[in-house]
Image (cartoon, helix red, strand yellow):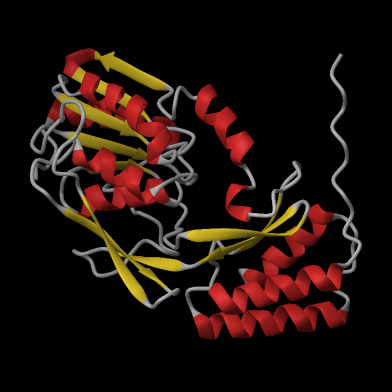
Amino acid sequence: MTTPAASPASVDDVPAVIEETARLLAANYVFPEVAERLAALLRRRLEEGAYDTADPAELGARVTADLQSENGDPHLRLKFHPERLLENGDQADLPALRREFAASLGGVPRVELLKGGVALLELAPMLFPLAWAAEPLSAALTLVARADTLILDLRDTVGGDPDTVAFVCSHLLEERTHLNTQYWRAGDRYEQFWTLPHVPGARFGGTDPVYVLTSGRTFSAAEELAYNLQQLGRAVIVGETTRGGAHPREGWAVHPHLEASIPVGRAINPISGTNWEGTGVRPDVSCPAGSALDHALDLANAEPAPRA
């Protein structure tokens, strides 16, 4: 017999939650001036009674709406978690994340050979930390390396690790390539991400056609993967404009069921000089996500994709 899960703890001290969220925001958000304005907004809204609720899910939704009111940053949230958080927000979802990793075969739920030498590789629900995902990704990417054309399905990929993005890109490019630069507010520093000089398995390589399927759900690190390949001219993006989150985040538990999710950096593509924040990755071939695979297959059968 399964024991019902306990209800999330109520918010006994809303002012303390709001004050800690405002403090973390001012100290860590990648845009300091915006952070100060939003912190002031949270405190003002608290005084107005806008956050008068003991329900953590409702409080999270109200605060998130205010946090996103200035620039719509989708990574900036007071996120509700049904399961109790650890004190370190970065590890808040670790048990659930491990379950997702196992249930999705390491983030590679589908590898299929289609007609015409086309391989379909789905990466979902996310690009898991490379320490976990290197083995299943290497196996899948080595398997599809023998195909004539690759379709990479990111329609249900909602985030992940930039090192994992670089790992996947390393299998699709021949030369050592600068993929992305992250600016971090902490230390006012820049960090470059490049393809790896060596991969543990076979490469698909830098010349055979690649198509990337996207949807309005495609988010964060999955958007970076699509954007990197698009900017390099390595892949044709097919589907819908993605969600538009280019700011890497960290999380802090401010209540047993509420995590302050705060972007601490921003992506800078070496080719475009910018990123996909707010705009999403715009497809080269626009169509509903549900028909993106059919469109990509038609393109693959009609003409080759652009090559690097």
Q: Is residue 27 left or right of residue 83?
A: left
Q: Is residue 46 above or below residue 176?
A: below
Residue at (69%, 85%) from the top-left corner? 40
Location of residue 214 in the rendering, given as x and y in whole percent from the top left corner = 38, 41
Left-right relation of 200 to 182 = left
In which quadrant of the rendered image does the N terminus lie?
A: top right
Point out residue 78 in the picture as x, y percentages from the top left corner: 68, 61
Q: Relative to the observer, which residue lies in front, 289 or 166? A: 166
Q: Is 228 left or right of 29, judged from the image as shown?
A: left
Residue at the image point whose x is 44% and y is 27% from the top = 106
> Which quadrant is home to the C terminus?
top left
Position in image of residue 147 (x %, y %) = 16, 20
Give above or below for 134 relative to 219: above
What is the count of numbered marks? 0
- Quadrant assignment, res 11: bottom right
Q: Residue 261 in the image: x percent, y percent?
A: 60, 60
- Establish if 198 lies above or below 74: above
Q: Which one is in front, 130 or 68?
A: 130
